[in-house]
Image: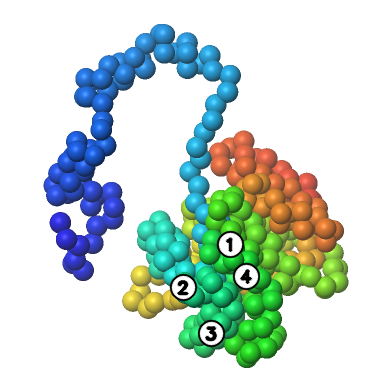
Amino acid sequence: MPQSAEKVLDHAPLFREPEYRQMLAEKKANFECPHPDQVVADQNDFTKTWEYREKNLGREALVVNPAKACQPLGAVFAAAGFEQTMSFVHGSQGCVAYYRSHLSRHFKEPSSAVSSSMTEDAAVFGGLKNMVDGLANTYKLYDPKMIAVSTTCMAEVIGDDLHGFIENAKNEGSVPHDFDVPFAHTPAFVGSHVDGYDGMIKGILENFWKGNERKEVAQAINIIPGFDGFCVGNNRELKRLLDMMGVSYIFIQDASDQFDTPSDGTYRMYDGGTKIEDLKTALNAEATLSLQHYNTRKTLEYCKEVGQVTASFHYPLGVQATDEFLMKVSEITGKEIPP
């Protein structure tokens, strides 16, 4: 069934169409060398027996293949949570199309990101020219307040230095010298999207905090939500709870508005996000709390280095986890938890 502007189907209903069912059945029969249906049925029956139960529960070790994506996806998502910020991925154009497609399909909202469009010549000679031209085009075409730079495999394999490239681009006049271009090296062949998220958040905080004097504001806290595919609802509920407690807080990386723009016929490339001025103020907070520990390991280390108290959770999902989070907030801020 061909796609058309009048009838665009997502992958799940699309693959249920008769044409796809036939194609997948032929692929299974001719190319996948499957076991006969009876063998599959017998194995299914075996999993319901007492013998299988004893073997299954008797295991002492388990290897799990986790659902994970590559680092730049996390960096692109992280950048989407800041005021008028364009994500710039130094690498091939096809990679960036994947990150945009992944986020757009999940949130059912446009996901903006640009690429330095590295090709074969850049892979041999380096991508400096791509960076110089790309930052200039991004600054002029999309009017961002900040450009957050990450990398793909190609840029990392050939060893492109983001700090040096960005400085050279500023010297070439691509963007003003005082324009904020935080960056994070995000090699896709190590770690996963949570590491890319962590690297980009740390890079953005360093961009605004490094070299500045910290003047601690007691009982003020920063909240880092982590790579949350349900941030549209979760972030708003978390802010509602904190507001009820009367807590002074800054939400670092808030993509709830960016991925939930109104259906009023007006396209918004940027919407919501943590304000640049709030990022600068966040240095003075007494504590930084991460709602997803493994998404923010390096970031929390950096927050400790600047003198902040840190704490992390495995996300406040459910009564027990929500209680744990709110009690920690109450402990740090001195605010009571209302009934």
Quadrant for the N terminus in the image: bottom left
Q: Amino acid at mark 1?
A: Val
For residue 218, side relative to residue 6 (left or right): right
- Amino acid at pointer 3: Asp
Mark 1 residue crowding within 10 angstroms, few (<14) / some (14–19) / many (20+): few
Q: Is residue 234 visible?
A: no
Front in this rendered view, residue 334 or 30? 30
Q: Is residue 195 left or right of residue 66?
A: right
Q: What secondary structure is found at the residue carrying circle 1?
A: helix
In space, the residues marked 3 and 1 are separated at their CA atoms by 21 Å
Q: Which residue is mark 3?
A: 133
Q: State the separation of the CA atoms marked 4 and 2.
A: 14 Å
Question: Which residue occupies 84% across, 64% down?
Answer: 216
Give the amino acid at mark 4.
Asp
Mark 2–mark 3 Cα distance, whole angstroms, equals: 14 Å
Identity of the amino acid at label 2? Thr
